[in-house]
Amino acid sequence: MVIGSVETLIQLAHENHSSIGLAMVKQEAAAKQCTEAEVLQQMNKNWQVMKESIATGIKTPQRSKGGLIGGEGRKVYDYCRSGEKLLSGSNVMEAVSYALAVAEVNATMGRIVACPTAGSCGIVPGVLKKIQELEQLTDEQIAVALMTCAGFGMVIAYRASVSGAVGGCQAECGAAAAMAAAAAVELRNGTPEQAGQACAMVLKNVMGLVCDPVAGLVEVPCAKRNALGASLAMVMADLALAGVTSVIPADEVITAMGAVGRSLPDSLRETARGGLAVTPTGLKLHQKIFG
Amino acid sequence: MSEYSCFDIIGPVMVGPSSSHTAGAVRLGRFARAIAGELPQQVEILLHGSFAKTYKGHGTDLALLGGMLGMETDDVRIRDSYRLADEAGLRYQFVPADLGDGYHANTAKFVMTTAAGETKTVVGCSVGGGKVLITELDGFPVEIEGMYPTIIDTHLDQPGVIHCITGVLMAYQVNIATMKVFRQEKHTVAYMVLETDQEVTAEAIEKIAALEPVLQVKFIKPF
């Protein structure tokens, strides 16, 4: 199945008189020659793994394989419950705590769902889990939201890239945040157009974000970029729901993001030869881990 | 990029931290195991490029070994691969190496000694998103992605052999998706890799093995 534009996603939703998520369920069932219920059941399995990864990261935080991160998700989760006044609000911060938790589980060789990649695996689960709690949604409703995410992810993969080695961090955490924002809009009963606006506004804000992992590990700054992605997704979804629109259409934003990714030097595309990776501290940590 | 399923974007379920350094590495290990036919006695794994530089931090070594032990990409026991390999009696060694120019940055070379004392080598790379490409088999250049059922055979390089092999597949209603033939020299030994749309039964593989010019044939499930 090839879905090459946000325009197409919106059109599919209109033809189906449904959300983009439900239209994607239909598309996937047709492509796979299976029932829509089977598609949702399979996606729900992925959702269960996502929820387990959140629970693991919050309940039993561990030091990462490379030793650079661990326990930050739990720290934020506890802070949310400490009675302190949260500047950004508890919904955003709890989504952030979950996103951090999943990114940490990934870094301990725990089980996660690549979404769209392992490095950006915390953003979608973090945002969707918080909205599920907030709106008391069923797992099946979240499975539909994951299909919204998949639709937007496909478009980004088609028009740009979802690989840090090809397009920098904007292609991984940026794409994940755009996917999560679009799904968040649909979970709050926004229109397909508003979902597209949320996607566009996220990607505009991460345009050019580089992939510069310290020591080449999926730890620093990856976990905190998952925090960025989750918070950005929540804020941009709210902007879209408030009726704010992107001056540049989503498909043009995605194409631009792809072009920016390709023009990034190699040193800023996952090779650990630029950015934070070559700061004095980054180099020192590299030396310490790999000798 | 061509066709995507929603589950390529939301998935796979895997153990972290990196689809290319862990999920792809597990799949390379699974393929090497399939080529050995069973758990080999010992394996030396040469790590090239980025694999050589960062394998410890990413757990690439654990993932390659986990794959050799038959684990799937989402098996949380991958963390314990060293211990489990010891328990299974597999001797292993990881060697950072420079395989030369022209190799993908995430390449591993398996040099295995089977229980029967044969040496088998597999070279493959992890190309991103958990996808892999096997590039050499016992010194022969190949291209195997492992997304389809795959038949690998060696046969005498003479007229009509491919006709006989594909004839067996036709009899078993197996459709060939892709097909590549490689050889080092004319009229010696050729290597053929066939990707099929259907599973191939053991009976069909036996029929191919029984063809006179066929030296060896192996069927490998998608890995």
Image: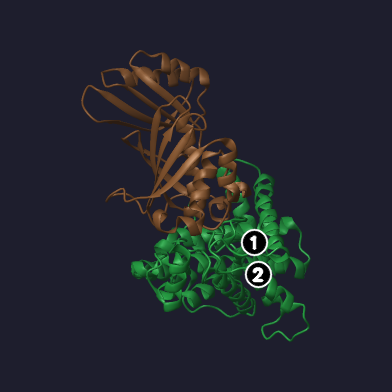
Chain colours: A green, B brown
- Residue under label 2: A71
- Residue type of the residue flagged with mark 2: Gly
Residue sitting nearer the eye, A63 or A39:
A63
Identify the image quadrant of the N terminus of chain B.
bottom left
Q: In this view, does A226 lie above or below B138?
A: below
Residue sitting nearer the eye, A259 or B18:
B18
Report whether A266 appears left or right of B88: left
Residue B152, percent across and down?
Answer: 40, 29
Q: In this view, does A168 lie above or below B178?
A: below
- Residue under label 1: A19
Crowding at mark 2 (Cα within 10 Å: few <14, some 14-19, many 20+): many
Q: Is residue B152 above or below residue B110?
A: above
Residue A145, percent across and down?
Answer: 65, 60
Residue B18, percent across and down?
Answer: 51, 57
**Element type at marker 2?**
loop
Q: Can residue A94 be seen in this view?
A: no
